[in-house]
Amino acid sequence: MSDSYHSLTVVLAGDIKDENCESLIEAIKQLRGVISVTPIVANFDSHMAEERARRELTNKLWDVIYPKRSD
């Protein structure tokens, strides 16, 4: 039995100004099966989540570069 999807989420590589995003929105609307495209405004919550993810990755990289010594 196969699954049925009701929506897909597109995540941008970075925040894009609304006036620069219009052509992308219009292009997505041209895809078969797309009824609407609703942009979501970047806010403090999205910034906080990104910073937390960046910090977690940074900490993991530091642990690889400078592993804790067990003396």
Image: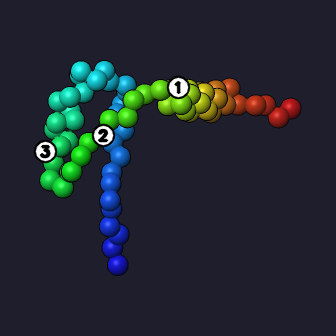
How far is the residue under mark 1 from the one under mark 2? 19 Å
Q: Is residue 11 above or below residue 55?
A: below
| Amino acid on which disc 1 is placed | Phe
36 relative to 15 in the view: left or right = left
Graded by Cα atoms within 10 Å as few (under 14), some (14 to 19) or many (20 or more), the crowding at tag 3 reads few
Kind of element beneath mark 2: loop
Residue 66 vs residue 56, the one in the foreground: 56
Q: Quadrant of residue 3?
A: bottom left
Image point (78%, 31%), residue name: 69
User: Which mark's residue is nearer the viewer, 3 or 2?
Assistant: 2
| Amino acid on which disc 3 is placed | Gln
> Which of the two labelled residues, at mark 1 and mark 2, occupies the earlier sequence position?
2
**Whole-percent x and y of residue 37?**
26, 42
Q: Is residue 57 above or below residue 17?
A: below
Kind of element beneath mark 1: helix
How far is the residue under mark 1 from the one under mark 3? 31 Å
Tell me whether the residue at label 1 lies in contact with that at label 2, contact meaning CB atoms closer than 8 angstroms.
Answer: no
**Whole-percent x and y of residue 17?**
31, 21
Kindly identify which residue carries mark 2.
Answer: 38
Residue 30 numbered tag = 3
Image point (20%, 51%), residue name: 34
> Which of the two labelled residues, at mark 1 and mark 3, occupies the earlier sequence position?
3
**Whole-percent x and y of residue 48?**
56, 28
Q: Is residue 60 above or below residue 28?
A: above
Kindly identify which residue carries mark 1.
Answer: 44
